[in-house]
Structures are given as structure tokens and as C-alpha cells.
């Protein structure tokens, strides 16, 4: 299944559009929603938390994750149109910027091909920066800068671990996890993020427990 998906991506690769305009597309998203684009160097704890929970091997693998591709193929064979998850951060960026129907099999394969182009054209830091500047965090906030200001009233750089891990968890389902409207769900998701940070060696169990009990300082 992995070989089939990889072959399909290879066939499509040559016919896919250029991704040189990816940074401009991210800026356009931010401008459209009154947000500000920030560098990944300013994202600190949020960037580390997002990588841990969304794509822990982000800096090690290429545009695809073999396990995730196998999951997509199996889901498609079963006739399930729901996104099975497991996409790499680069694939998620490709879907956000270029794929109109990412839930379809063709959309998923296109995302793989576009992710390959993104990885050839941009560094991992640039890809992570674009991803965090482009995605929706809920409550009308697009991009990590707007989300930090909107939920906590501070810059991304100033977020505590408690705030950063809450924010990192929202990308999974922004509307359902909106901490202003569904605080308990958001906190439960935050625990998943903290667990991943422990599993990946970023935090100790003791530190994670302390962070999990710390005040969130939400704007309301």
C-alpha cells in the first residue's frame, strides 16, 4: 500500500503546480484575517509543542510518513471518506494552501506530491513557520500570532508552557476545542500535548504535571 501511494505521488509530482508562492499565500491568509506573520524563531514553546503532538518526527522524515500513508490507503479501501489523520506537518501545509478537497483520495495524493515540492523548496523551519502562520486556531483566529493575542493577550514569544500547550492542541479541531466555548475539552487536549512532550523527552513527567496545573490566563 505504501508503494502504491508513493508511486501515485511520483506520477503526479511532475504535473503539480509550483509552490514558490507558498510564503505569499500564507501572508495573504494573515492579511485577509487581520493577522500578523511571525518568524518561527519567535514561536518558541508553541513550535516545540506543535511538532511533538502533530508530527514528532518532523525533523527526521521527508514529506511523508510511511505509517500515515498506509493508514490513508487502508481507510480509502474501506470506503471511509473521513481524514484518518497522521499527515505530516508539510502535508497539512500543502492541504491548507493548495488542496480544495483534502478529504478525497485524489486530494490526499496531491497533498503528498505538493508536500514533496515544499520540502525541496523550503527548509523545515520555513515550513513550520508557514504552517503555524496559516492554520486556524478557532474563535476567528488565523495564525499563531492572532491566536496568542486573541486567547491570551500576549505575543507568541511570551506564552508560558501552559498557554503554549493549550494553543498547540487546538489545531486538531479548532471549533470543538475553542477554550472560550469548550474549556474542558481544550484542557483535556492540552493533557495529550503534555503527554507527547514527555514521550519525546522535551519535558519531564514532573514538569508536565506542574504545567498542567498552572493557570491558563485566558483573556476571559
Image (cartoon, helix red, strand yellow):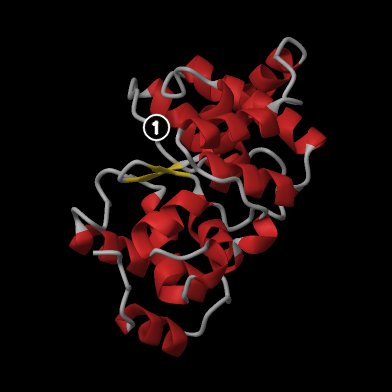
Q: Can the viewer see residue 1 in this picture?
A: no
Query: Tag 1, which secondary structure?
Result: loop
* Displayed quadrant of residue 187: bottom left
The residue under the point 57% across, 27% down is: 97
The residue under the point 34% across, 41% down is: 140
Name the side, left or right, on which 60 lies relative to 102: right
Image coordinates for residue 206, horizontal then vertical, percent: 43, 90
The residue under the point 37% across, 64% down is: 152
Residue nearest the observer in this picture, 185 or 27 = 27
Q: Single out the residue that lies furthest toward the right.
A: 120
Image coordinates for residue 76, horizontal then vertical, percent: 42, 23
Residue nearest the observer in this picture, 165 or 73 = 165
Residue nearest the observer in this picture, 133 or 10 = 133
Q: Can the viewer see residue 184 in this picture?
A: yes
The answer to whether residue 104 is above or below residue 194 is above
* Displayed quadrant of residue 47: bottom right
Crowd band around label 1 with a 10 angstrom C-alpha radius: few (<14), some (14–19), many (20+): some
Name the side, left or right, on which 155 lies relative to 162: right
Image coordinates for residue 10, horizontal then vertical, percent: 73, 20
Which residue is disc 1 drawn over? 83
Q: Count the marks: how many?
A: 1
Q: Single out the residue that lies furthest toward the top.
A: 15
The answer to whether residue 86 is above or below residue 116 is below
Instruction: Name the image quarter holding the C terminus.
Output: bottom left
Name the side, left or right, on which 17 lies relative to 199: right
Amino acid at each position: 500500500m505504501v508503494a502504491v501511494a508513493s508511486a501515485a505521488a511520483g506520477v503526479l509530482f511532475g504535473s503539480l503546480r509550483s509552490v514558490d508562492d507558498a510564503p505569499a499565500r500564507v501572508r495573504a491568509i494573515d492579511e485577509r484575517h487581520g493577522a500578523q506573520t511571525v518568524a518561527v524563531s519567535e514561536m518558541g514553546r508553541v513550535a516545540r509543542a506543535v511538532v511533538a503532538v502533530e508530527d514528532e518526527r518532523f525533523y527526521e522524515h521527508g514529506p511523508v510518513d510511511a505509517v500515515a500513508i498506509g493508514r490513508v490507503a487502508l481507510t480509502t479501501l474501506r470506503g471511509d471518506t473521513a481524514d484518518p489523520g497522521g499527515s505530516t506537518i508539510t502535508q497539512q501545509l500543502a492541504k491548507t494552501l493548495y488542496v480544495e478537497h483534502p478529504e478525497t483520495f485524489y486530494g490526499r495524493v496531491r497533498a503528498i506530491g505538493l508536500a514533496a515540492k515544499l520540502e525541496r523548496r523550503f527548509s523545515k523551519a520555513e515550513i513550520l513557520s508557514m504552517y503555524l502562520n496559516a492554520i486556524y486556531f478557532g474563535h476567528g483566529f488565523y495564525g499563531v500570532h492572532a491566536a496568542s493575542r486573541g486567547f491570551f493577550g500576549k505575543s507568541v514569544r511570551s506564552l508560558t508552557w501552559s498557554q503554549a500547550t493549550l494553543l498547540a492542541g487546538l489545531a486538531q479541531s479548532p471549533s470543538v476545542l475553542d477554550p472560550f466555548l469548550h474549556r474542558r475539552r481544550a484542557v483535556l487536549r492540552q493533557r495529550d500535548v503534555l503527554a507527547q512532550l514527555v514521550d519525546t523527552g522535551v519535558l519531564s513527567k514532573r514538569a508536565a504535571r506542574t504545567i498542567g496545573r498552572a493557570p491558563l490566563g485566558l483573556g476571559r
